Image (cartoon, helix red, strand yellow):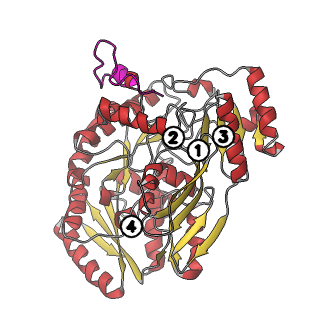
Amino acid sequence: MSADALRPANLEEPRAVSARERDALIRELLDVVPSHGVLHDDEDLRPYECDGLSAYRRKPMLVVLPETIEQVQQVLRLCQAHQVPVVARGAGTGLSGGAFPLANGVLLGLAKFNRILAIDPDNRSARVQPGVRNLAISEAAAAHGLYYAPDPSSQIACSIGGNVAENAGGVHCLKYGLTVHNILELKVVTIDGELITLGGQSLDSPGYDLLALMTGSEGMLGVIVEITVKLLPRPERAQVLLAAFDSVERAGEAVAAIIGSGIIPAGLEMMDNNAIRAAEDFVHAGYPVEAEAILLCELDGTNAEVSEDIMKVRNLLIAQGATEVRTAGDDQERLRFWAGRKAAFPAVGRLSPDYYCMDGTIPRKNLGQILRRIGEMSGEFGLRVANVFHAGDGNLHPLILYDADTPGQLERAEDFGGRILELCVEYGGTVTGEHGVGIEKLNQMCTQFTPDELTQFHAVKAAFDPRGLLNPGKAVPTLHRCAEFGAMHVHHGQLPHPDIPRF
């Protein structure tokens, strides 16, 4: 199947760029970026045709790989002058198509911004470039007894710039927060090439909280070129409980019971039987493969705190119907338990030729009901599901198994995923927890937000990027798209607030 055949039919493409315009842009880009940093041959563009949402592929018109902030500024000025859209890309591990390229646009790769600029143990912070891997920050800070708390399962590969763009989480976000709670300052280049600083080194900064606005903005407002993150001291002790259950509903109810008891674990993760078996075959973590679901509950703090909380949680899990509860005997076993969870996504590839990873959130109290409905919908769509998710904060990651070579299965998987996201909204949740909206969840954004709310999103976008050149067609749907999706009423063909630009 060709890459063009895997292009989403409903994703709007910006205006066509002629061969003459393209060649002129290439010549100007070569004046500001080294020749090896401007890619335009077919074989050089192929590696950039998708991000982690590999079901959709499309070659970018050009790929530009700047090496300095000044080069980023000049590239954006040139793109603005030529009215050519720009998609910023980090490590390409995103799962919602946020870095999906444009056939008539420039893909701005930030992989060469890969230096840790400073570790400040006194102020417990690190200043890094956006291409630095998430895990590399903790590795660099380890000598000072510090670490960076957000830990996506892809942390060995994903870059911190992408984490900021998508507001990534991880297995320890329940206690320590998402990316937005763990950064102090951003340096961002706007579409007109201006370098701005948001936030500061102190706990608070004057003015509007634009740092939070930029975090999770999916490259639509600016290009992040430097990040200052918070570092935390390593806890004195961390210990993991593994609890097995004979039903996913009981495991879900146990999650709500733990949080309801007043204990906030460092991490609280859940896997169903499909995920358990795949991870065990792949990692040999020692999981009970007959269990319908397992919970991994990590508690950290001082020795005394952990000892007390371990006994409380153990007794609570047994009272909630756990068929088996194990406590990691040492740090090696604790890391092995987590290795199985963090390898669950690739491990599920052993069960099916392809899978579609969803990302939605729900109130914790509804975990059992949602899992039951997902099971019922699995039967309706005739597609298996492996459930792996951050149970403590209600962030679901159902993995819908399908075979792209079987006609109609990808479309069924997409419809199934959309139904799951709409179910999340129905129960008071959201259509994304940490993967972002990208191109994947545009229709479900129409379900979650009203026309007036979407209009305000577009107004914010216009304030930063009046001509809509930064990552157009992503994250925020047009009102016309929502009307076509059937989730919004447009009176006599007229949109509210027609003076607001739509992108």
Front residue of this view, candidates 392 and 408:
392
Tell me where residue 251 appears, x and y as whole percent: 25, 59
Q: Which residue is mark 2?
A: 464
Q: Nearer the viewer, mark 4 or mark 3?
A: 3
The answer to whether residue 419 is seen in the rendering is yes
Q: Residue reaching furthest top? A: 492
| N-term-proximal mark, 1 vs 4 | 4
- Of the numbered discs 4 and 3, the one sitting upstream in the chain is 3
- Residue hosting label 3: 76
Disc 1 residue type (three-letter)? Thr
Is 474 placed above or below 17 here? below
Q: CA distance from mark 3 to mark 1?
A: 8 Å
Q: Locate residue 192, reporting x and y percent.
A: 62, 40
Circle 2: residue type: Phe
Q: Please, is residue 2 above or below residue 429 in the view?
A: above
Give the CA separation, mark 2 to mark 3: 13 Å
Magenta highlight on residue 10: no
Q: Mark 1 or mark 4, which is nearer to you? A: 1
Name the magenta segment's main secondary structure.
loop
